[in-house]
Image (spheres, rainbow, N blue to C red):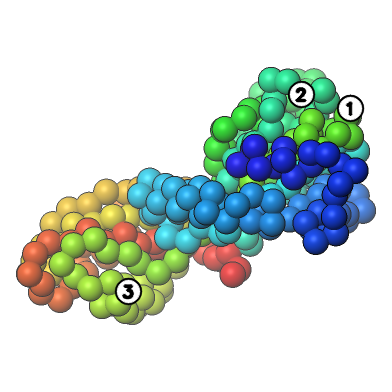
C-alpha cells in the first residue's frame, strides 16, 4: 500500500487530472486541516480490500463489533493538524493504521494525541503544575502500526512542522468500529440469529436502562449456544461502560445484571452448536 502511494506522487511533472485530482483539502477553520481521499483512488482496490477484510475480522473476533467503516486515506504535510475533538457519535473504537515512514520523517508533530483516561478532579493532580503531556499521551505514528482507542476519548493530531513533500508526510488509514447486527458461526442460520437477537435486545432495553442508569457504552459478548437452543457459556469480548451523569450505576453491577438477562435467552434448536456474537448497548448509541 505504501509503494502504491509513493508511485502516485512519483514524477510530479507528469501528473494528470484523472489520476491526481482526487484529494479533498479538508479544512474546517480552527479544527481540521489535512488532505484526504478514498484509499482505492490511490491504492489498488484489491490491496484495500485485503486490508479491510483483516480489519473487519479483528473487529468482530477480538471486540465483538460487527461493523468496521471503510477507511479514509489521509495525508498531513506542513501546516496540517487536527484540533482536539472526540468521535462519540461515529463509533465505539477509532482505528488509525499508519503508512507513515516515521523513522525517516523530516517533520515534527504528527503523533496521535489521546486524552489520558484517569481521574483528575478528586486526585492529587489538581494540586500539581501540569502541561499538555500530563493530560494527553502522544502516540508516534509508526509505520505498519494499528492504533485503536475509545472514540469518546478527546484526541488530536499536533500540527506538522517541516516538509511539504507528500511522501515525507503523515499518511494514515482511519475509521471506526461500530456495533452492528449479530453474527453467528455454526449450525444456526445468521438471518434467524439476527432476528432473534434484535428482538431480544429490544425487550431487554428497559431492564438495561434501569441496571445501567447514567452509564453509556457497550457490552459485547460471544455466547455458545447448544443444539437445543440453550446458552451454555460465553465470554465478554469488550466492556467499557462510563458514567455520563451524577449518581450513575456501578458498571460491574450493570454488567452482571446484563449477563443475567442474556442467560435467559433461548435460540431455536439446530443440528449442532453455534457461537453467537452481539452487543448490548447502554445509554445513547453512536449515530449511523
Q: Which residue is located at x 85 percent, y 55 percent? A: 16
State the image coordinates of residue 269 (x, y, percent, origin top left): 10, 74
Mark 2–mark 1 Cα distance, whole angstroms, equals: 9 Å
Q: Quadrant of residue 125?
A: top right
Q: Is residue 279 visible?
A: yes
Labelled disc at residue 162: 1
Q: Which residue is located at x 57 percent, y 56 percent? A: 45
State the image coordinates of residue 44 (x, y, percent, origin top left): 60, 52
Tags 2 and 1 in contact by the CB under 8 Å rule?
yes
Mark 2 vs 3, N-terminal side: 2
Mark 3 vs 1, N-terminal side: 1
Vertically, is 86 above or below 89? above
State the image coordinates of residue 137 (x, y, percent, origin top left): 67, 29
Mark nearest the camera among 3 and 1 is 1
Q: Quadrant of residue 122?
A: top right
User: Regarding mark 2 in the picture, which secondary structure is present there?
Assistant: loop
Residues 137 and 181: in front is: 181
Vertically, is 118 above or below 214? above
Residue corresponding to mark 2: 105
Tags 3 and 1 in contact by the CB under 8 Å rule?
no
User: Regarding mark 1 in the picture, which secondary structure is present there?
Assistant: strand
State the image coordinates of residue 95 (x, y, percent, origin top left): 58, 46
- Seen in the image, is 145 located left or right of residue 193? right
Mark 2–mark 3 Cα distance, whole angstroms, equals: 47 Å
Q: Which residue is located at x 40 percent, y 69 percent? A: 181
Q: Is residue 246 visible?
A: no
Residue corresponding to mark 3: 194
Mark nearest the camera among 2 and 3 is 2
- Seen in the image, is 286 located left or right of residue 201? right
Amino acid at each position: 500500500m505504501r509503494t502504491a502511494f509513493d508511485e502516485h506522487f512519483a514524477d510530479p511533472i507528469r501528473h494528470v487530472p484523472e489520476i491526481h485530482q482526487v484529494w479533498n483539502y479538508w479544512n474546517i477553520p480552527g479544527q481540521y486541516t489535512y488532505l484526504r481521499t478514498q484509499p482505492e483512488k490511490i491504492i489498488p482496490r484489491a490491496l484495500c480490500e485485503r486490508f479491510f477484510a483483516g480489519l473487519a475480522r479483528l473487529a468482530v473476533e477480538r471486540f465483538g463489533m460487527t461493523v468496521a467503516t471503510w477507511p479514509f486515506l489521509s495525508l498531513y504535510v506542513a501546516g496540517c493538524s487536527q484540533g482536539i475533538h472526540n468521535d462519540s457519535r461515529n463509533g465505539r473504537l477509532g482505528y488509525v493504521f499508519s503508512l507513515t515512514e516515521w523513522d525517516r520523517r523530516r517533520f515534527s508533530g504528527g503523533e496521535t494525541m489521546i486524552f489520558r483516561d484517569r481521574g483528575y478532579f478528586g486526585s492529587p493532580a489538581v494540586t500539581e503544575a501540569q502541561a499538555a503531556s500530563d493530560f494527553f499521551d502522544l502516540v508516534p505514528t509508526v509505520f505498519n502500526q494499528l492504533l485503536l482507542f475509545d472514540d469518546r476519548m478527546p484526541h488530536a493530531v499536533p500540527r506538522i512542522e517541516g516538509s511539504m513533500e507528500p511522501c515525507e508526510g503523515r499518511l494514515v488509514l482511519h475509521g471506526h468500529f461500530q456495533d452492528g447486527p449479530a453474527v453467528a458461526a455454526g449450525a444456526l442460520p445468521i438471518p434467524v440469529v439476527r432476528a432473534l437477537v434484535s428482538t431480544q435486545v429490544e425487550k431487554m432495553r428497559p431492564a438495561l436502562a434501569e441496571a445501567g442508569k447514567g452509564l453509556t457504552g457497550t457490552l459485547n459478548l460471544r455466547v455458545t449456544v447448544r443444539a437445543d437452543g440453550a446458552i451454555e457459556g460465553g465470554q465478554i469480548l469488550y466492556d467499557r461502560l462510563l458514567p455520563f451523569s451524577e449518581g450513575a450505576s456501578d458498571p460491574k453491577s450493570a454488567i452482571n445484571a446484563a449477563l443475567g438477562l442474556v442467560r435467559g435467552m433461548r435460540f431455536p434448536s439446530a443440528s449442532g452448536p453455534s457461537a453467537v456474537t452481539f452487543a448490548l448497548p447502554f445509554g445513547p448509541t453512536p449515530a449511523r
